[in-house]
Amino acid sequence: MSRRQLPPLTSLRAFEAAARHLNFERAGEELAVTASAIGQQVRALESWLRRPLFIRLPSKGVALTGLGERYAAAISGLLDQLNEATAQAMRPDASTVLTVSTMPSFALSWLIPRLGSLKERHPELEVRISISVNLTDFGREDVDVAIRFGQGVYPGLRSDLLMEEHFFPVCSAALLNDPLRPLRDPSDLRHHTLLHEAAEGIPDYITWPRWLALAGVDDVDASQGPRFSHTFLALQAAASGQGVALATSVLIGDYQDAGRLVRPFPHQVRSPHQYYLVCPEASADRPAIAAFRNWIRDEARAHNEQL
């Protein structure tokens, strides 16, 4: 194996920060050094490469050269991977503390009610739930595993399919038994208030307009009705008799089991997204993560069998 040609890490860090900010002073603030020190490290890297990475502008600003843009894009991901690998190396394999990142509705309706069985199975594990609607950046965040809602393509991560999801209308039993406004098939929804979830940032998410179109219903105005930031809020409104919400086979939770919500008709639409457990390949076999993975896959399997 030939000897690697690697520039000094200090110079790489300085260049990558300066490239992101396009400003030596802000890069220095990030790395706790002076702007002059950033400039010296960048010049050292340019000397090592024998190629310019920045264009010094008359206004005392800087711009990346073509090579600088390509080099910055390449090493930014590599530094993230190095940061992730270092964080994993510093964390003892025997650590029993596990941080799990997931979406608010999934945490409230599915994950948290099941944590008691995890404690029974693995009393040594200390699980910390982190709520976020954004994708986890394992290189920058203190997160061990994440539960994502998507299509399962996550480069560099180990991905385990947990559950598929179907969407269907739900309402309170009182609303269902309203003699003046029957609710026996999807076209009857035109007589009722539709409760919406504002699912921003999720392409092809099953909203009311999309659900009605896929169900072949074209005589219902899906533009009207209150909107809620999370699924569990829309379900609570439906359970209170305020209208009809779209529930999912994963997030219906205790509402259906307790009889607080009912399905007025069997029509449902399969989601293009599923739930996945993801984590970095480098840490996937750490005992605590492996234990959590095995447990949640068993819980997901039991959930699927009940549908």
Image: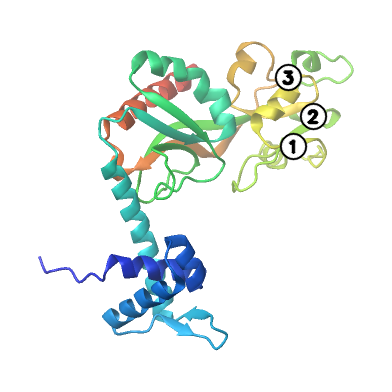
Question: Residue 158 appears in which quarter of the rendering?
Answer: top left
Question: Residue 205 appears in which quarter of the rendering?
Answer: top right
Question: Residue 170 appears in which quarter of the rendering?
Answer: top right
Q: Position of residue 50 (x, y in %)?
A: 29, 85
Q: Position of residue 51 (x, y in %)?
A: 33, 84
Q: Residues within 10 Å of mark 3 (few under 14, many from 20)?
A: many
Q: Is residue 138 left or right of residue 258?
A: left
Q: Which residue is mark 3?
A: 239
Please name the residue shown 60% across and 12% down the image. 257
Q: Are marks 2 and 1 in contact (CB under 8 Å)?
A: yes
Please name the residue shown 65% across and 23% down the image. 266
Q: Which residue is mark 1?
A: 217
Please name the residue shown 68% across and 20% down the image. 263
**Sequence order check, earlier mark of 1 and 3:** 1
Q: CA distance from mark 1 to mark 3?
A: 24 Å
**Sequence order check, earlier mark of 2 and 1:** 2
SS assignment at label 1: loop
SS assignment at label 2: helix
Q: Residues within 10 Å of mark 2 (few under 14, many from 20)?
A: many
Q: In the rendered structure, which amino acid carries the disc numbered 3?
A: Ala
Q: Position of residue 235 (x, y in %)?
A: 69, 25
Q: In the rendered structure, which amino acid carries the disc numbered 1?
A: Val
Asked if residue 288 shows in the view, the reply is yes
Q: Which residue is mark 2?
A: 189
